[in-house]
Image (cartoon, grey):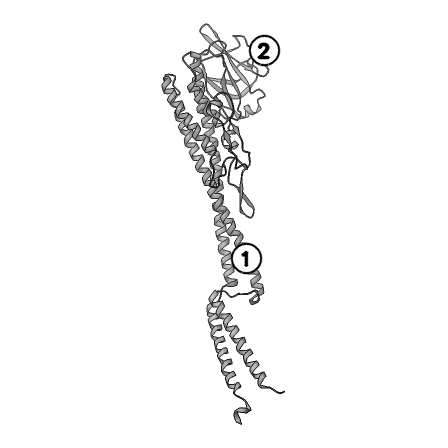
Amino acid sequence: MRISSGMIFDAGVSGINRNTSSLLHVQQQISANRRILTPSDDPVAAARALEVQQASDVVAQFKQNQSAATSALGLEEGQLASATDVLARARELAIQAGSTSLSTGQRKAISTELRSDFDQLLGIANATDGSGQRIFAGYMGSTTPFGGSVDNLIAGNEIVYQGDDGQRKLQVSPSRFIEVSDSGNDVFKRIRNGNGTFVTDYAGGNTGTGAITSGSITNPAAWNAATTKNVAIKFTVTGSVTTYDLVDTVSGNSLLTGGAAPASAASQRVFQSGQPIVLAAQGAEPAFDLGASVTVTGAPASGDSFSVAPSTSQSVFVTLANLIGALEAPTGTPGADAKYVSDIGFAVTNLDQASSNILRVRAQIGSRMNEIDSLGSLNDDLGLQYRQTLSNLQDLDYAKAISDLTHQQTSLQAAQQSFVKIAQLSLFNFL
């Protein structure tokens, strides 16, 4: 085989270029602290590193979503904490207003502050987040959820909710979408009135000084099983004795006799102010049991009546408006004073129900935030695991890289020096 000078030069240059390329590759690996610079360096490891990086990016996005969810829930919780403070102050004022000895000016001062509390609570219910979305409007974040005024509510008009019942959600893990808002309906309107099971009230034409409490459940199973839950307590005054009859307001029958109302005076029960009125059969009365009792204080007049009915939903705005209306209503007669005392008592009970409902929502928010914290810890562990896996796949072994660099430098120097020697092997050098 004939070897020409051209072949010698081409082979020498090729070897130098190959060694230079290898040396440059090792130098780039050291500079980038990466073993894999291109997929061809390790196709299997490069593919696996891409999968791990994608999984790591998903975890990072969930981390951002968790941060956004925590921020949204924290903002909502802050608004509800303010609402709790407003209701607590309103309750203090209601208790302060419970005395019939307050002057008209004192009641006016209390109602003025309560009107301010109403406006503050309405502002909380219409609050926005950092992006201008209404917190308590459900999915309709661009819509102001509540509108109305105290005077409209006192006139008997319920406040209108313009939002919906939706709860905005964020995905905070591969399988968990967490609620980051609550509807205004659930927070401010869908509140059980009375004691949460039944609500008491007085007849509009009462003239005596009798006032009724919110009552209590003594036997929940009996209440749930009762077929009659709408009861009127009707009073009769005969001389110095006051008696009462329990009447099914739907059928009009007396529960004490099982017959048509009213029961005879002999069949009625004797009333004692401040003693519980048990809504269940006693002695020879026909069997019935609502599992509940109420208390009437004062001296009801003959013909006065009070009612017991299952609880319904009542907004916190109506509760405040009713309290303000009671404070601003005229008093001075026995009947008006009795209504005033009852209305104040109803307001305190309903404010407690509203506060309990807001505390329920705040507890749910706290539970969601705890869940996000747990998911955040899990994401931190996953992120660390993915970083370790990527490090094992991609990171450079510096000891081996330095050794390879030295080896490549030696190879390149040998190729260069040998090429110089071989390039001098020419017949022209001996002529």
Task: Estimate how packed mark 1 is, as few (under 14), some (14 to 19) or many (20 or more) residues with alpha carbons within 10 Å.
Answer: some
Quarter containing the N terminus: bottom right
Q: Nearer the viewer, residue 259 or 312?
A: 312
Q: Position of residue 90 (x, y in %)?
A: 41, 27
Disc assigned to residue 52: 1
Say whether disc 1 or disc 2 marks the residue closer to the N-terminus: 1
Residue 409 appears anywhere in the view:
yes
Q: Nearer the viewer, residue 414 or 348?
A: 414
**Distance (Cα) linking label 1 and label 2:** 80 Å
Outermost residue on the right side: it is: 1
SS at mark 1 in the image: helix
User: Would residue 342 be found to the left or right of residue 264 on screen?
Assistant: left
* Rendered position, 32 above or below 150: below
User: In the rendered structure, which amino acid carries the disc numbered 2?
Assistant: Ala
SS at mark 2 in the image: loop
User: Would residue 363 be found to the left or right of residue 96 on screen?
Assistant: right
Which one is in front in this view, the residue at disc 1 or the one at disc 2?
A: 1
Disc assigned to residue 260: 2
Q: Position of residue 162 (x, y in %)?
A: 54, 31
Q: Nearer the viewer, residue 255 or 356?
A: 356
* Rendered position, 328 above or below 430: above
Disc assigned to residue 99: none
Q: Position of residue 182 (x, y in %)?
A: 51, 36
At 40% from the left edge and 12% from the top edge, which residue is drawn? Answer: 332
* Rendered position, 323 above or below 420: above
User: In the rendered structure, which amino acid carries the disc numbered 1?
Assistant: Val
At 56% from the left edge and 60% from the top edge, which residue is drawn? Answer: 48
Q: Nearer the viewer, residue 117 or 84?
A: 117
* Rendered position, 368 above or below 388: above
Q: Are dots 1 and 2 in contact, CB under 8 Å?
A: no
